[in-house]
Image: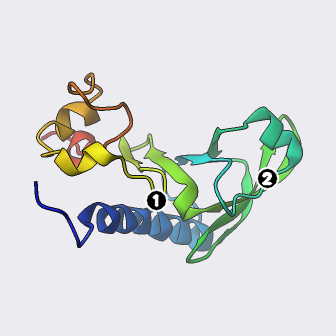
Amino acid sequence: MAVDHIRYDILAQEALRGVVHRVLVDAAKNGLPGEHHFYISFDTRADGVRLSPRMLAQYPEEMTVVLQHQFWDLIVTDEGFEVGVSFGGIPERLNVPFAAIKGFFDPSVQFGLQFDPAGAKSDDEDEDDGDDREGAANGDKPAEGEKPGEKVVSLDAFRKKP
């Protein structure tokens, strides 16, 4: 297979992270519209992630934060977001770079995105023809030779059916 010198995989990841950026900017400015709320999963070990030692001890690898009713002071920059949330009645301040985000889901409209860890690319991705992406996005078992969580979620899996 030909070498992808343009790196479409990285360009697509950046564009989809831009969706998360735009949605969070709007939420910071106008609040959450209607029933929308967000589950944001991120790598707690990634560069630039800031959270308390207590939270890092409780979530040493990955954490999911829910932005719904009890969050405050959402600040969004080009690099990431910062937000106040309460865990077990204790207020916490999180700083999450967009590059650390592993997943974004809005259950009110069944919309979600899954991201490859920033900069990660396995050797066998160059050989992938992409034919089995929709099956993996729909919760099917990964195709033979495919590692779980290795694909970007197809947006078709989250669109409402007519």
Question: Measuring 36% from the left and 61% from the top, which residue is drawn there?
Answer: 13
Find disc 1 in the rendering and name its residue.
119
Circle 2 crowding by C-alpha within 10 Å: few under 14, some 14–19, many from 20: some
x, y percent for residue 26: 52, 70
Residue that lies at the very extreme toward the bottom in this rendered image: 78
Q: How many marks?
A: 2
x, y percent for residue 18: 42, 69
Q: Is residue 81 depicted above or below 146 in this figure?
A: below
Q: Quadrant of residue 17?
A: bottom left
x, y percent for residue 132: 15, 36
Q: Is residue 35 visible?
A: no
Q: Do callouts 1 and 2 mark residues in contact (Cβ within 8 Å)?
A: no
Task: Please state which amino acid type lies under the numbered disc 1.
Answer: Gly
Side of 60 relative to 88 (left or right): left
Q: Nearer the viewer, mark 1 or mark 2?
A: 1
Side of 144 relative to 75 (left or right): left
Q: Is residue 77 depicted above or below 123 in this figure?
A: below
Q: Is residue 98 visible?
A: yes
Find disc 2 in the rendering and name its residue.
51
Q: Quadrant of the C terminus?
A: top left
Observer-nearest residue: 135 or 156?
Answer: 135
Task: Please state which amino acid type lies under the numbered disc 2.
Answer: Leu
Under circle 1, the secondary element is: loop
